[in-house]
Structures are given as C-alpha cells and as structure tokens.
Image (tube, rainbow, N blue to C red):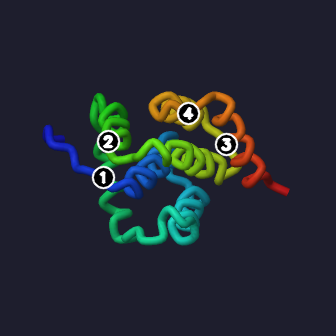
Amino acid sequence: MDDTLPSLSQQDALVALMIAVSASHGAVETSELVAIQQMLNHLPVFADYDINRLGHVARTVFDLFNEEDGLDALFALVRTALEERLHETAYALACDVAAADGHLYQTELRLLEEIREELRIDRLHAAAIERGARARHMRG
C-alpha cells in the first residue's frame, strides 16, 4: 500500500470498524453483513450516508488488514475522522456486529478490546454497551 491513506468521513469510520470486526476472524459471516446493512438502513447516524461508499470502505479495511501495521493505520484513520461524541456509538456498532452471529471469536474480542482502548471508552460504559449488544442478539 502506498504512503497516502484515504480519508474517511465519520460515517465511513463507523462502517470501517464494523467491517473490521466482521473480518477479524477470517470470514465475514452473512449474519454480520445483514446486521451492518440493517444499521446502515435504520440508524439516524447513517441517515445521509451514501451506501455506495460501502465497497470503498470495505476495500480500504481489507487492504489495511493485509499490511503489517494495517490495524494501527486503520485506527489512525478512525481517530482522525471520528468526533469524540461518536466514540461510544462506534463501540456499540462494533459490539453489535460481533454479537450478530451468536458467537464471539477470540479475535473479535481482542479487536473490541483494542477499539475500546483506541477510542478511550470508559470500562463501565463499555460493559454496559457490551451487555446491551449481548441482550439484543440473544438467541431464543
């Protein structure tokens, strides 16, 4: 990858983290893609998001995952694009994607931990967000 990283909008940054969590265990699950699509279609934060950006953002994430320091580069892009007021939103969306398939992989848990640290999410707030995601995606 060249030295110039693409810039991301705030919404792109949220999407990038969701895709990163989905791809973190080596296979993007259909249930995770459906969850991402539903969030893009229904959450107010994505009300004016250009869905055509999804492919570009996904390619950026996959390209970065193939680089040695790609995760650090991804976090740099996200920190640059994302206002602090959306940090908890970003973490909540990432948790929802991780929980969507009913199974939390170790790689997803590690990535969520890194996202929590990168975005400086308070541990108590993170626990509440995680609990909410778990409750929303509980199987009957």
In the image, what residue type sits under mark 3? Ile
Mark 1, Cα crowd under 10 Å, few <14 / some 14-19 / many 20+, is many
Query: Which residue is at a point 45% across and 52% down the rendered structure image?
Result: 14
Quarter assignment of residue 107: top right
- The residue beneath circle 4 is 121
Query: Which residue is at a point 29% across and 29% down the rendered structure image?
Result: 68
Circles 2 and 1, Cβ within 8 Å, touching? The answer is yes
- The residue beneath circle 3 is 129
| Mark with earlier residue (3, 2) | 2
| Mark with earlier residue (1, 3) | 1
- The image position of residue 124, as x and y in percent, is 68, 30
| Mark with earlier residue (2, 4) | 2
In the image, what residue type sits under mark 1? Leu
Q: Secondary structure at mark 3?
A: helix
| Mark with earlier residue (1, 4) | 1
- The image position of residue 3, as x and y in percent, is 14, 38
Tag shown at residue 8: 1
Q: Nearer the viewer, mark 2 or mark 1?
A: 2
In the image, what residue type sits under mark 4? Ile
- The residue beneath circle 2 is 80
Circles 4 and 3, Cβ within 8 Å, touching? The answer is yes
Mark 3, Cα crowd under 10 Å, few <14 / some 14-19 / many 20+, is some
Q: CA distance from mark 4 to mark 3?
A: 10 Å
Q: CA distance from mark 3 to mark 2?
A: 23 Å
- The image position of residue 24, as x and y in percent, is 48, 40
Depicted 120 relative to depicted 61: above or below: above
Please give left or right for residue 113 compared with residue 126 in the image: left
| Mark with earlier residue (4, 3) | 4
- The image position of residue 140, as x and y in percent, is 85, 57
Q: Secondary structure at mark 4?
A: loop
In the image, what residue type sits under mark 2? Thr
